[in-house]
Image (spheres, helix red, strand yellow):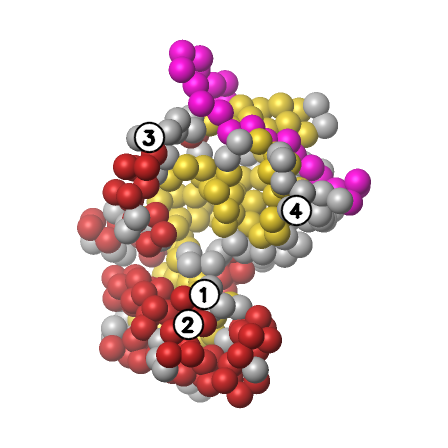
Amino acid sequence: MGTTKERAILFADLRGSTALYLKLGNTEAATVVTQSLSLLGQIVAKGGGRVVKTLGDGLMAVFDQADPAVEVAVSLHDSLERLAPIAQHQAARHGAIRLKVAIAWGEMVEVDGDCFGDAVNVAARLLDLAGDHETLTTGPLLRELPSDQQERFRSIDKLHLRGRKEPVPVLRMEARRFGDTLSTVIMDAQETDMPDGIRLNWLGTERVFSTASMPLVLGRSPQASFCVSDSRVSRSHARIESHSGHIYLSDLSYNGTHVRFDGDDQALTLRRGTCTLHGSGVISLGAPSTDPTSTQIRFDVLSFSDTLPQC
């Protein structure tokens, strides 16, 4: 038996390979995925980690310290723009390949080259909840980081991890889609009304949430910010948050989240993806809005002047 140690466990998973095979064909798509995983493995090794194993379209890695794992997570996300040859770069640029990452700090034991233990289990469960281009973690890893690294992370809510009785506080590393475009978004937002909150209405239950009270989770769990009762809805099904003058909706579920904006004939389907909420419309959890039995939450993005929202 191996010796129990405290380590950082990182899981990374490439998404979109199915669509890639349809777009590029089997041979070229397989080359893209294989070389992409190889590139991710090289980044892990260069950052001081060790790839324990590859898992389909992803990998699992271990780090002796927490901060190198965080730096590697940043590099992994950035790497998708540096894929070569040209066909791979085009595939990544058009969104065919996406990446999600999860990191956990805790006890693990190494047996015959593989790793087992609490940190492995937590990281694997976090990966299930992560959306495209996201890196998720929990408090134990954050406490191992220097202050400048801790500032990268934002608490998103207490989420239910499979195998855990109580919800776990989860943090997300600020994604490049918000961080690097911050100045541009703010400049654009100054020219229009910035949203101050959102109104949600389901079967007569109406709640108004200010941006200051976000993020909020929609789901079946009694601990969810907006709780609904439907077996097709996950306990933590979707997340609404505010960044840089915009309100975003992210799917966290297995059955998907559907958004139909007023005036649009077609609904937008999110599967671990994110979209910007604007105006008004309907958020359907677990089934499309065309299904009359689905959970359909009416939303209105609000701008307040003198009125304070009630949360």
In x, y percent, where is residue 136?
Answer: 41, 55
Q: Do the residues labelled 3 and 4 touch (CB within 8 Å)?
A: no
Q: Distance between the residues labelled 4 and 1?
A: 21 Å
- Disc 4 to disc 2, how far (Cα)? 27 Å
Q: Residue 191 carries which label?
A: 3
The answer to whether marks 2 and 1 mark residues whose Cβ atoms lie closer than 8 Å is yes
Drawn side of residue 291 relative to residue 148, left or right: right
Assess whether residue 304 is covered by the magenta stretch. yes
- Closer to us: 45 or 75: 75
Please tell me whether residue 186 is drawn above or below residue 111 in the rendered image: above
Crowdedness near tag 1: few (<14), some (14–19) or many (≥20) residues, C-alpha within 10 Å: few
Task: Give the magenta part as a residue range.
Answer: 291-311
Q: Do the residues labelled 4 and 2 touch (CB within 8 Å)?
A: no
Residue carrying label 2 = 90
Q: Mark 4 points at which residue?
A: 266
Q: Kindly identify the amino acid type of the residue bearing the numbered disc 1.
A: His
